């Protein structure tokens, strides 16, 4: 079995970098770190035949884990139509029309990442504009916050949505004055589209995984926590059987199939370092961009005044239903990861976790809240007391600054990474890709600088910024803790998995601008170079 000595300008193990400063070499065998330290000393003690890989003046850090990614949706965006930068509905429609010309007949068009809040003029689109450029081809385009779908008439027909279709619990089929569906689907009304994306209509799951894997490795990502459907798990298993899986997968389970997961004997923590089963993913509310996150006070209107008094957002899962799901899952050894963005949603989720505390301890589970964007400050202490992981996305801060005037309460902790850590809560960072690009270096820079959309420091609770080491830890040690894998990953201590990234800068000392624009020179997973610039 080959032993490899990797040398570099510096190695930040995140295990014990205090002492005499960072190491300059890693000795690796069988996918594990044997030792770190001085290159000459390690070379002298290495076995005969040790291979030397010189990473030059690179700085090595543990591999990044993206703790919240929609892998199928991200892959479809890589392959589908991208409306992220469209500045108007007309421009979005032109891009759709151009992309349709490249597609085989009858294929379903996914993709999107459109944001009507940033269009000039701002406009809520409808199916008629899509119909004009897509005809009978079914089209469902996800919004930038992934909580709204823009569908054409052909897609509505395929989905079985008519004027008589009732709104699903926790969702909305938007209708015009005549009662006809406009083509806009919100919250749980989006779920059937997600099921389609995870089925044959969404394309070849294995090839999608390959495409996403290539992109992620080039960003220094060595593992992901996926929150899409089970197609991702099946694709990863296929790739592993073929010897082509180079990305570690922590697979969250869709709540719609909870009984099937239980019947199949799946339990949180099952698996191995390559593929491991995570918690069940539950939606508590919506998103800020769609004005559907559940807030204590009603949203403000565009002028800063109070909007309709009923406009508190959408309660996707009611407290009684959440209690039942937590009890059912936990009693079968499955933890929960609950999406909660609004302050009221976060409070309700913490209430439910508190009611399930005895069962959680009995089965030795650890729950998560995904996003934690707005939270009442007393609830930060409850996060810590209940041992709940805060899975957050620093890249959301800048684009959401433009929506700040809709937030009804300036006293809420907003994107409160500093307060979360200070409360003693485990913090794990992710991208929510494809909502944001899965680029951890961008996330680290955003958490440290707390930029606004103009590239200058944002004025929304600027004290919530992190130090470079804290931001890096959220993508490494924090993400490992969130998946229950702190004993095998997140640092480069002896015995840990040999997953690491070689960068052209030192993320602990470089400016935020330099970190954001840094180059990933090499990504190593299981001791093997999987990507090299």
Image: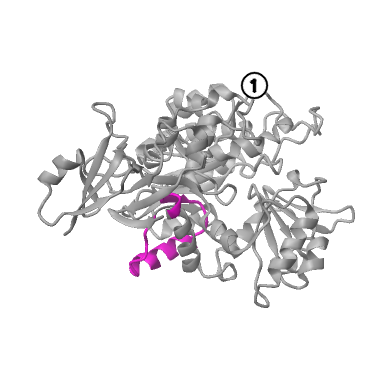
Q: Residue 247 vs residue 495: left or right? A: right
Q: Is residue 300 above or below residue 178?
A: above
The residue shown at (28%, 44%) is: 488
Instruction: State yes or no: residue 240 in magenta.
Output: yes
Percent across and percent down for residue 96 are 72, 63
Instruction: State yes or no: residue 6 in magenta.
Output: no
Q: Which residues are magenta?
A: 218-247
Q: Residue 236 vs residue 413: left or right? A: left
Percent across and percent down for residue 332 are 40, 49
Location of residue 295 by image quarter:
top right
Foreground pick, 480 / 39: 39
Q: How many marks?
A: 1
Percent across and percent down for residue 246 are 37, 59
Q: Is residue 276 above or below residue 415?
A: below
**Residue sitting farthest toward the right:** 178
The quadrant in which the N terminus is found is bottom left
Location of residue 135 by image quarter:
bottom right
Q: Is residue 341 visible?
A: no
Location of residue 217 by image quarter:
bottom left
Residue at numbered disc 1:
411
Secondary structure of residue under mark 1: loop
- Crowd class of label 1 (few under 14; some 14 to 19; many from 20; radius 10 Å): few
Foreground pick, 369 / 107: 107
The residue shown at (73%, 30%) is: 405
The quadrant in which the C terminus is found is bottom left
Foreground pick, 9 / 121: 9
**Residue sitting farthest toward the front:** 56
């Amino acid at each position: 079995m080959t032993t490899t000595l990797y040398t570099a300008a510096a190695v930040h193990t995140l295990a014990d970098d205090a002492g005499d400063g960072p190491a300059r070499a890693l000795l690796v065998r069988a996918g594990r770190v044997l030792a770190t330290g001085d290159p000459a000393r390690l070379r002298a003690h290495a076995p005969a035949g040790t291979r030397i890989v010189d990473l030059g003046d690179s700085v090595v850090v543990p591999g990044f884990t993206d703790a919240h990614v929609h892998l199928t949706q991200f892959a479809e965006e890589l392959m589908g139509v991208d409306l992220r930068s469209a500045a108007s509905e007309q421009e979005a429609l032109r891009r759709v029309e151009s992309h349709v010309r490249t597609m085989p007949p009858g294929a379903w068009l996914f993709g999107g990442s459109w944001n009507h809040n940033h269009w000039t003029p701002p406009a809520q689109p409808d199916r008629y504009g899509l119909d004009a450029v897509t005809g009978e081809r079914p089209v469902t385009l996800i919004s930038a916050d992934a909580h709204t779908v823009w569908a054409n008439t052909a897609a509505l027909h395929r989905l079985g949505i008519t004027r008589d279709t009732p709104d699903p619990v926790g969702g909305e089929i938007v209708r015009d004055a005549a009662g006809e569906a406009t083509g806009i689907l919100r919250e749980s009304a989006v779920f059937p589209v997600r099921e389609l994306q995870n089925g044959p209509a969404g394309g070849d799951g294995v090839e999608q995984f390959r495409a996403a894997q290539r992109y992620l490795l080039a960003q220094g990502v060595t593992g992901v926590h996926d929150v899409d459907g089970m197609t991702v798990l099946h694709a990863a298993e296929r790739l592993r059987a073929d010897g082509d899986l180079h990305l570690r997968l922590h697979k969250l389970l869709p709540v719609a199939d909870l009984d099937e997961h239980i019947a199949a004997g799946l339990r949180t923590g099952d698996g191995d370092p390559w593929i491991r089963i995570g918690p069940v993913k539950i939606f508590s509310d919506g998103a800020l961009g769609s004005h559907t996150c559940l807030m204590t006070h009603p949203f403000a209107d565009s002028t800063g005044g109070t909007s309709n008094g009923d406009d508190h957002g959408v309660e996707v899962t009611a407290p009684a239903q959440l209690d039942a799901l937590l009890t059912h899952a936990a009693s079968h050894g499955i933890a929960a990861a609950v999406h909660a963005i609004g302050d009221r949603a976060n409070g309700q989720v913490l209430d439910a976790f508190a009611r399930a505390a005895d069962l959680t301890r009995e089965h030795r589970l650890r729950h998560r809240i995904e996003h934690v964007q707005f939270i009442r400050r007393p609830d930060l202490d409850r996060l810590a007391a209940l041992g709940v992981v805060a899975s957050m996305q620093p890249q959301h801060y800048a684009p959401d600054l433009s929506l700040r005037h809709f937030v009804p309460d300036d006293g809420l902790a907003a994107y409160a990474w500093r307060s979360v850590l200070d409360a003693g809560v485990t913090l794990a960072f992710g991208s929510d890709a494809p909502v944001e690009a899965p680029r951890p270096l961008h996330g680290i820079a955003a958490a440290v600088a707390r930029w606004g959309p103009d590239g200058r420091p944002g004025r929304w609770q600027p004290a919530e910024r992190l130090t470079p080491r804290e931001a890096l830890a959220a993508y490494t040690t924090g993400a490992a803790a969130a998946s229950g894998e702190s004993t095998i990953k997140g640092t480069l201590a002896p015995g840990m998995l040999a997953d690491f990234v070689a960068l052209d800068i030192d993320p602990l000392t470089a400016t935020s601008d330099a970190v954001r624009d840094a180059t990933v020179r090499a990504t190593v997973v299981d001791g093997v170079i999987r990507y090299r610039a």
